Image (tube, rainbow, N blue to C red):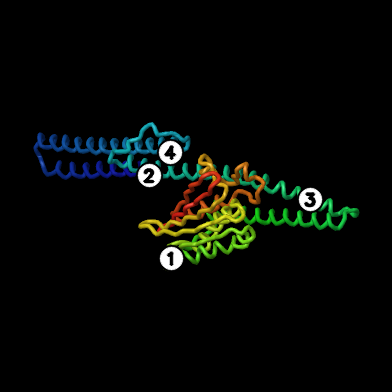
Amino acid sequence: MKTYIFLGLTACALTSALVWILWESVPEAPVRYAILAVCAGFILLAGSWAALQRHQIVRFADNICETVDAAIAGRQPEILRPYDDSLTSKVQDRLMQYYDIMREERLQSQRDKQTLQSLVSDISHQVKTPIANVKLYAGILRRQDIPEEKRAQFSDSMEAQINKLDFLMQSLIKMSRLETGTFVLNPVESRLIDTIAQAMNTVWGKAEQKEIEISVACGADITVWHDPKWTAEAVGNILDNAVKYTQAGGKISITVRPWQFYTRIDISDTGIGISQEHYNNVFQRFYREEEVAAEEGVGLGLYLANGIITRQKGYISVKSKVGEGTTFSVYLRS
């Protein structure tokens, strides 16, 4: 506003100086009147221009304030011209972009809070039973009248519950790192056979106890851009499920097939199978079918495996037939 006052005063001063100079040099009255008219018109024009500029600035400020007020209230601005090539439109566009970013961050924060609440609820539910069992066995073992045979049996049971708690906590730590994005993938171009071997080491003992045969068909020269440690964790979780739900004397086969864009790892077993309506459910956190509720596990293995593979731009599919077996296919970007 001060700028326009200064410009107006400057224009008046210049016009007055011009009138005085011309007035003295031109004696004719009509010419003098003409000069006065021109100067008056010039002053009027300058005043009109200043008033117009002030009006435009006020309107610009009102539009921006309305846009900001609308963003604060979480609604669309009443005056929004996204296709106009004007300063107001450009500033409004930037403000709305900033508003969209902040709204998405706010929604993400709400989603994270809900995820955390769900996670805490799931954890408290999962640890409740083994902790209660440990307390129960500890109370029984404090009694003096228990035969040594029973004492050893209860000690073994308590140790099993402690091991279950340890396994659960380790799985929950991995899950929390996965969901919060705090774990870091370090993909490198490396041989897939080495990653599969690392995954097999985690289940070899259990497979031997159940006399389950595990076969691998993977070329030694097949390389994939992946994180060997975390990919072995994912494949190992799938293998652990295969061993767990395959009857004694069954078979598990691992077949690697290089494709143009993906390398496919098929993990097939001769286990109990999965009904088709549960294909998507098996990748959910803590999901377990009623038929296998008595088996060891907490329902995090496939959830973790799916999260690890998807974060490497891959995916997992499942195909199964109840009573005949299941095939999990892991697709890694070639």
- Pick the front one: 284 or 94: 284
Tell whether 325 sits left or right of 125.
Answer: left
Q: Around disc 1, counting alpha carbons within 10 Å, would you say few (fewer than 14), some (14 to 19), or many (20 or more)? A: some
Q: Decide which of tag 1 and tag 3 comes sooner along the chain.
A: 3
Tell whether 151 sits left or right of 186.
Answer: right
- The residue pinned by badge 1 equals 219
Q: Around disc 2, counting alpha carbons within 10 Å, would you say few (fewer than 14), some (14 to 19), or many (20 or more)? A: few
- The residue pinned by badge 2 equals 94
Q: Residue furthest top?
A: 78
Q: Decide which of tag 2 and tag 1 comes sooner along the chain.
A: 2
Task: Residue 135: give its label.
Answer: 3
Disc 4 from disc 2: Cα separation: 11 Å
> Could you tell me which quadrant the C terminus lies in?
bottom left
Residue type (three-letter) at the residue carrying disc 3: Lys
Quarter of the image for residue 291 reads: top right
Reply above or below: 18 against 162: above
Badge 1 marks a residue whose secondary structure is loop
> Could you tell me which quadrant the N terminus lies in?
top left
Tell whether 186 sits left or right of 56.
Answer: right
Labels 4, 2: front one: 2
Badge 4 marks a residue whose secondary structure is helix
State yes or no: discs 1 and 4 in contact (Cβ < 8 Å).
no
Q: Position of residue 333 (x, y in %)?
A: 41, 57
Reply above or below: 333 against 114: below
- Pick the front one: 21 or 114: 114
Labels 1, 4: front one: 1
- The residue pinned by badge 4 equals 68
